[in-house]
Amino acid sequence: MTMADKPHQVFEVYGESKCFDDDGRIKRTGSVWTASAHIITAVIGSGVLSLAWATAQLGWVAGPTVLLLFSFVTYYTSALLSDCYRTGDPVTGKRNYTYMDAVRANLGGFQVKICGVIQYANLFGVAIGYTIASSISMVAVNRSNCFHKQGHHAACNVSSTPYMIMFGVMEIIFSQIPDFDQISWLSIVAAVMSFTYSTIGLGLGVAQVAETGKIEGSLTGISIGTEVTEMQKIWRSFQALGAIAFAYSYSLILIEIQDTLKSPPAEAKTMKRATLISVAVTTVFYMLCGCFGYAAFGDQSPGNLLTGFGFYNPYWLLDIANIAIVVHLVGAYQVYCQPLFAFVEKTAAEWYPDSKIITKEIDVPIPGFKPFKLNLFRLVWRTIFVIITTVISMLMPFFNDVVGILGAFGFWPLTVYFPVEMYIVQKRITKWSARWICLQILSGACLVISIAAAAGSFAGVVSDLKVYRPFQS
């Protein structure tokens, strides 16, 4: 039996030690700032680049309003979810190490399986979405340089397939980092990169508005008749809801981030502060990027602000922004996939506890550093996972549609339904009380939004598949 398998016995021995937490695990060192970095890395992802397009579909009234509403719902339900990290007492109660553990402790039964399927399918989908987004940015760097040399009307067609393979190779290497606790440095680098490209996108939007002296767009969004049919307007508006939901989605890894925090103070208190800081910062960025992008381009706002070639110059600045996107997505991919990796490896160890392939770690000497602990199962399974997500990305590289589907699929169950239901159980809120009714109304309204967003995004995929030819530039 390993130390991790018998936390209570370990605690009896090391209870007074400064090296171990109350569950016998190595003392956690995370703070409000590392948690904020993890959240910002997860939240300010590729989703920010589709917000100008989403605002264009909804217009000046609905666009910013929907952004603010999603930010409020995300913050509120994340605060509810952070209270579910410990079962019972918020300071000394039993820890829940993963989102699924929290659902198991509070709701149990069939809901645990439903949660697991949705959470891990969503994480798998995010990996695909990030692979697509990174390849689009790498292609944009190539095309930007081509336009600079040959003029804005040059064809400059570039296939995204080789770039997806390059991103996949990078992720195979980074995926060998054993667990979440060891990627805080990668999260901090990624968070800096996300601010870099978001700021450049915002700056270019502001410069475009200043140069033309005109604010584009309308109160109701993209025009029916001149740009789209009435039906397309409806589907695109629904798809925009999915894109905005995706831009705020991180609840599915909140418990895992909270499990890296030191205490005291209580983890829930630190997590609420980190959530407030992160959601406030990202909302300001989202409002600025979405609104200035729409102000600059109006109905013609590109699906991806930095790769849609609304901007051509300064080309070197676009290159810096797109390289920053790629660096950020390398880190964000890991932040999202580590919980999935941990779940599969933990399950495999429980099923085959005597298998040397699954449990044995080999020390690989690295000059000047501690030996790297290589696990054969981790190496093979994580490599296969990255290869599968890369191949699927090659077959369906539709950025806005994939983003919309992911947002719609994960938003209601993971960001709203499970946190609300767990909080009701945790706080013993009486059925049909005023608070219970308000929470159920919130959950029901978000379900309607998710269904509409899913319908719009699937309609977009069907439309794109009619004209798409795989592996062609």
Image: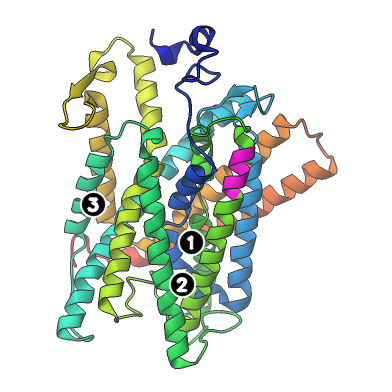
Tell me if 401 is positioned left or right of 225 in this view.
left
Q: Are marks 2 and 1 in contact (CB under 8 Å)?
A: yes
**What is the C-alpha distance between the residues marked 2 and 1?**
9 Å
Magenta-highlighted residues = 269-275
| Mark nearer the N terminus (3 vs 1) | 3
- Please name the residue that numbered disc 2 is placed on: 53
Is 344 rendered above or below residue 212? above
- Tag 3: Cα neighbours inside 10 Å, few (<14), some, or many (≥20)? many
| Mark nearer the N terminus (2 vs 1) | 2
Residue that appears at 46% across and 57% down: 44
Label 1 sits on a secondary structure element that is helix
Residue that appears at 46% across and 20% down: 19
How far from the left and from the top, in percent, is residue 137? 29, 64
Q: Amino acid at mark 2?
A: Trp
Secondary structure that dominates the magenta span: helix
- Quadrant where the N terminus sits is top left
Q: Nearer the viewer, residue 47 or 449?
A: 47
Q: Amino acid at mark 1?
A: Ala
| Mark nearer the N terminus (2 vs 3) | 2
**Which one is closest to the eye, mark 3 or mark 1?**
3
Q: Is residue 354 visible?
A: yes
How far from the left and from the top, in percent, is residue 104? 57, 26
Residue 243, numbered label: 1
Q: Nearer the viewer, residue 163 or 274?
A: 274
- Please name the residue that numbered disc 3 is placed on: 167
Quarter-of-image position of residue 461: bottom left
How far from the left and from the top, in percent, is residue 297? 44, 82
Is 435 rendered above or below residue 83? below
